Amino acid sequence: MTTKSKVQIKREFDAFAAKIAQLELLKTQLNALDAHGFESEVGLIRAKLHDVGSLNEAKRDLDSLRKKIAQKALSKS
């Protein structure tokens, strides 16, 4: 069995903490959106915000949701 050095553990912890911070930022951005009419997409994204392994997918989904919201706003004008 391989033991990890303190430096490796610290590096992994810092990477994990950075991902948590990114998830929190995405959560803040999601909460700031007027996503009326897109409740199902919001729910799916919120579920992904509980898993650091889903960070990239959550980012993509949030970007997609922003585009949908922008398109909806343009169609109303």
Image (spheres, rainbow, N blue to C red):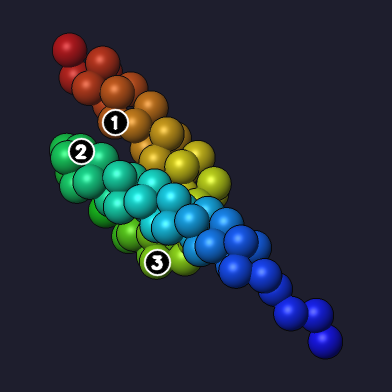
Tell me which residue sits at (48%, 56%) in the image.
14
**Residue at the disc numbered 2:** 33
Instruction: Report crowding for label 3: few under 14, some 14 to 19, many 20 or more residues within 10 A (C-alpha).
Output: some
What amino acid is at disc 3?
His
- Given contact means CB atoms under 8 Å apart, are the residues at marks 1 and 3 in contact? no
Tell me which residue sits at (33%, 22%) in the image.
71
Q: Looking at the image, tell me whether mark 2 or mark 1 is earlier in sequence order.
A: 2
Q: Looking at the image, tell me whether mark 3 or mark 2 is earlier in sequence order.
A: 2
What amino acid is at disc 2?
Leu
Percent coordinates x, y for residue 17 in the rendering: 43, 58
Marks 1, 3: nearer the viewer: 3
Tell me which residue sits at (29%, 31%) in the image.
69
**Residue at the disc numbered 3:** 50
What amino acid is at disc 1?
Ile
Percent coordinates x, y for residue 19 in the rendering: 46, 53
Q: Is residue 17 visible?
A: yes
Compared to residue 3, the image places residue 58 above or below, namely above
Q: Disc number at residue 69? A: 1
Report helix, strand or loop for mark 1: helix
- As drawn, which residue projects farthest toward the right? 1
Q: Distance between the Cα atoms at labels 2 and 1?
A: 9 Å
